[in-house]
């Protein structure tokens, strides 16, 4: 079912998912992540985390926006983080729960107001997968992945978040969470 994972990896994933479920919302377990960003030249920056010292993210803008095109722009990293966080949890939960669904790819689309002070208004994440999972299992996976993903759980209070899962080339579920009404400034 999950051929990409060794038996040992499957057991590790199931153990970690169980531990997270056990500590759900008790506030006793906190996470901390630090990223150091070094200014290189112009709009080029190198980002590294002490927790992952072997990896450097290069951030830049295209020449049309004053950059040197040495790496993707910040918003590409933002949407990549949004989508890959949800996708990681979707896959981890399918492994932990023994649900037959294998992800092929994902598209993430963000819509934002480009004015000064503008913000993202909507983010749509579409997962394409195959497998024998039932519609109910896919719905349960998507809902839990949204809760397990710290980025999704943070953004859904500020942005319209939509998750679509296509299973075997058929749109199986669509979930949209709207942020609570905001006080106008």
Image (cartoon, helix red, strand yellow):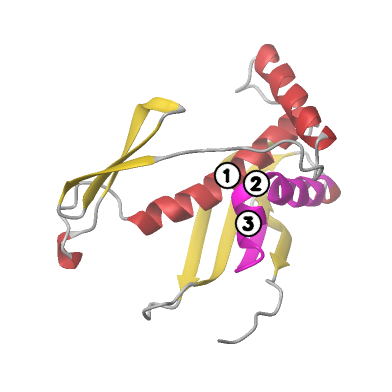
- The disc placed on residue 176 is none
Badge 3 or badge 2: first in the primary sequence: 2
Q: Secondary structure at mark 2?
A: loop
Stretch in magenta: 137-164
Q: In which quadrant is the N terminus drawn?
A: top right
Circle 2 residue:
149
Mark 1 or 3, closer to the camera: 3
Task: Kindly give the residue lying farthest to the bottom in the view shown.
Answer: 184
Identify the residue at horizontal 72%, vertical 35% (top origin): 29
Pointer 2: residues within 10 angstroms few (<14), some, or many (20+)?
some
Give the answer, above or below, for where 176 lies relative to 4: below
Badge 2 or badge 1: first in the primary sequence: 1
Identify the residue at horizontal 63%, vertical 44% (top origin): 129
- The disc placed on residue 85 is 1
Q: In which quadrant is the C terminus drawn?
A: bottom right
Q: Let me know if residue 62 appears in the view.
A: yes
Nearer to the camera, 90 or 30: 30
Cα distance between the residues tagged 2 and 1 = 6 Å
């Amino acid at each position: 079912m999950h051929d990409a994972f060794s038996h040992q990896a499957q057991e590790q994933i199931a153990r970690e998912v169980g531990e997270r479920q056990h500590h759900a919302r008790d506030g006793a377990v906190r996470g901390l992540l630090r990223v150091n960003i070094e200014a290189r030249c112009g709009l080029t920056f190198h980002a590294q985390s002490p927790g992952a010292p072997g990896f450097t993210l290069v951030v830049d803008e295209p020449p049309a926006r004053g950059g040197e095109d040495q790496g993707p722009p910040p918003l590409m990293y933002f949407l990549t983080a949004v989508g890959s966080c949800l996708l990681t949890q979707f896959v981890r939960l399918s492994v932990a729960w023994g649900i037959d669904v294998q992800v092929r790819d994902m598209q993430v689309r963000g819509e934002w107001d480009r004015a000064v002070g503008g913000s993202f208004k909507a983010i749509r994440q579409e997962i394409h997968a195959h497998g024998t999972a039932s519609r109910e299992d896919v719905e349960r996976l998507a809902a839990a992945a949204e809760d397990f993903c710290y980025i999704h759980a943070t953004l859904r209070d500020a942005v319209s978040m939509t998750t679509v899962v296509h299973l075997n080339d058929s749109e199986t579920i669509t979930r949209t969470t709207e942020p609570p009404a905001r006080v106008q400034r």
